[in-house]
Image: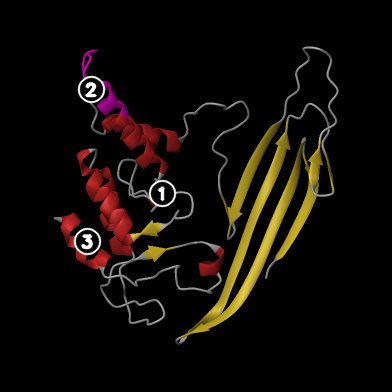
Amino acid sequence: KGKLQRQWKRAGSAWELVFDYRASHRYWHQGNWGKGQLHRKLTVRIENAGSKPSYEDGRIHFPIKLKPGEPWHVCIKMIPEIEGKKLPVLYGCHDFFAADTELDRRRHIFLNEATHFHTKESETLSSVVIQALRQAKNDLAALRLYDLDADKRDWTMAAGLPIYVALFGRDTLTASWQSALISPAMMRGTLPELVKWQGREVNDWRDEQPGRMLHEAHTGPLATLGYNPRTRYYGATTTSSFFPVVAA
């Protein structure tokens, strides 16, 4: 069990509520031993508020009194930090629609360069096919693991949403191979990424062997603290056997 601290503070013209969680765990599994450390932080940053906020009983309060037709505004940013690495805020105040960030540009490159259909208006099912393809491309783009991008065009994806946001060998290979009709970008990003995770030693706890391909790699609390081996786990034969199929 870890320790969660909350801090309400003034930050220049803004206000911040900081959640700071730390945990540690000593583990010993089949010759693997050590001390797992977890440090996760979330900063709720309040900017440009139309009235002064306060924090009490675990809640942020805003006193609001408006005349008819009078506007009120506030910007709330969620800033996560994982093991000391602060994730950037992608969208700022008033960004209710997609902005031109680096991740947006990479996403649009894939959507624009991937397979697309175009036909004249007709009474056939062409519109259904076009819409299905468009939705499929957007669904795949939603699974993209941007921190594992090979470059702005070649990328790999998570196994699924919402609970499998991690790199899985078999699932990622299957999805990228089946999606090749849309774009080879996912295969070009997935194959070299999995090579980086290839087994280097004999480790019974992780079911690791030299040359064996990855089954799954997680960054969740249980894996990070060493309760399970899933920060790097190799307990499957399907990734190794399917890798040459996709590579071919």
Q: Which mark is residue 126?
A: 2
Q: Residue at x 24, y 67 (%)?
A: 240
| N-term-proximal mark, 2 vs 3 | 2
Residue 126 magenta-drawn? Answer: yes
Question: Which residue is the site of mark 1?
Answer: 145
- The correct choice, above or below, for 137 with respect to 202 in the image is above
Quarter of the rendering containing residue 74: top right
**How far across and how far down the image is residue 129, in percent?**
25, 28
Q: Which mark is residue 113?
A: none
Secondary structure under the numbered disc 2 in the rendered image: helix
Q: Mark 1 belongs to which amino acid? A: Leu
Residue 126 seen from this side = yes
Q: Is residue 97 left or right of residue 106?
A: right
Question: Which residue is the site of mark 3?
Answer: 243
Residue 109 seen from this side = no
| N-term-proximal mark, 2 vs 1 | 2
**How far across and how far down the image is residue 39, in percent?**
62, 63
